[in-house]
Image: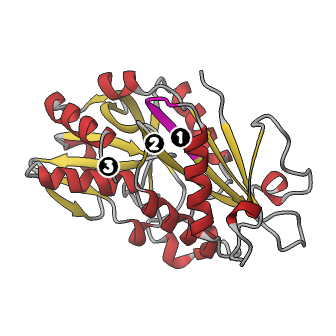
Amino acid sequence: MSQPVLVLIDPVTPTSAPSAERLRIVPADQPIVTAADLGVTRGDGIFEVIGAVRGQMQATEAHLTRLSRSARMLDMPEPDLAIVEEASRLALAEHEPVEQLWIKIIVTRGVEGSGHPTAWVYAFEGEDSSAAQRDGIAVVRLDRGYRSDVAATSPWLLAGAKTLSYAVNKAVGREAKRRGADDVIFTSSDGYVLEGPTSTVIARFGTTLVTPPPEDLGILPGTTQAALFEIAGELGYATEYRALRSAELEGADGLWLVSSGQQIRPVNTLDGLEINRDRELDDALLEKLLYRTH
């Protein structure tokens, strides 16, 4: 495994200071966050993970747009997206060449009362997803405990923000393991499909690929899902954003979980029920996702 690269950004908010004074490469094992940082004590912060394949960052603009969106949802200072992108590209350039790299962007609210966010970019080799991409995964559905309209009725719950508060997402991963599964699809308490803990859900019905609408359901807008929809169109498939009832997944002609790090993982079973797979289509989508240039 290669050595990760850590780039500090200070300040991450807009300033007239040159980037050379704002970016600093430090040893990846060096402590950079104080014990009073709200990212540590409260999980109060936001993040993004940009995938890079063969030295090419993917969906960079979409990830930065989503980072800004999350900052607004949390009432955090607006990050300077230009310096965040520069730090990401610096981390990529400083990392030794590898086939696939994950570039994680972290912005916390900083030390309580300081009004000064803490920010860094961490480039590293993520887990090997090739087996799941090739062989598929077993998935279970878990009720998230919210209605599908929670984003409209209770915006303070931050549904759809990509925050550092990941205790629930990690807990459902452990629950999936207890149930003999690899991952989870969240459903709403009123029976709609939402998302995975770290992924977007896409279902195929005939020649149409469907994903839940993020703005309506309070889920994260999928950067990899958006790329896959573009690819699907090139392959002759129709695409659609619409609310999906949980029961509809059982009759899908294909089902995938997609994300920046793991790209695309076909679902073999859903709560033990076998799901159809078109392996030729799976392979074509994976190939095009991996080697896209934007």
Tags 1 and 2 touching, CB below 8 Å: yes
87 shown above or below 17:
above
Residue 10: percent from left, percent from top: 77, 63
Q: Decide whether residue 99 is among the magenta residues.
A: yes
State the CA–CA distance, disc 1 to disc 3. 16 Å
In the rendered structure, the answer to whether residue 120 lies left or right of residue 54 reads right
Q: Which residue is mark 2?
A: 52
Q: Quadrant of the C terminus?
A: bottom left
Which amino acid, by three-letter code, is at mark 1? Trp
Query: In the rendered structure, which disc, 1 or 3, sits on the residue that comes first in sequence?
Result: 1
Q: Earlier in the sequence, mark 1 or mark 2?
A: 2
Badge 3: residue crowd in 10 Å (few <14, some 14–19, many ≥20): few
Place of residue 123 in the rendered image (x, y in percent of width and height, measured from the top left): 60, 41
Q: How is the image coloured?
A: secondary structure
Give me the residue at 37% from left, 44% from top: 258
Give the residue at mark 1. 102
Which label sits on residue 257?
none
Q: Which residue is labeled 3 in the image?
A: 293
Tell me the element at label 3. loop
Which region is colored magenta?
Answer: 97-103
The amino acid pointed to by label 3 is Thr
Q: Nearer the viewer, residue 277 or 60?
A: 60
Q: Secondary structure at mark 1?
A: strand
Helix, strand or loop status at disc 2: strand
Tag in front: 1 or 3: 3
Left or right: 282, with 73 as reference point: left
Quarter where residue 14 is shown: bottom right
Is 275 drawn above or below residue 153 in the view shown? above
* Residue at x 60% of width, y 49% of height: 90
Could you tell me which residue is drawn at 9 percent across and 47 percent down? Answer: 206
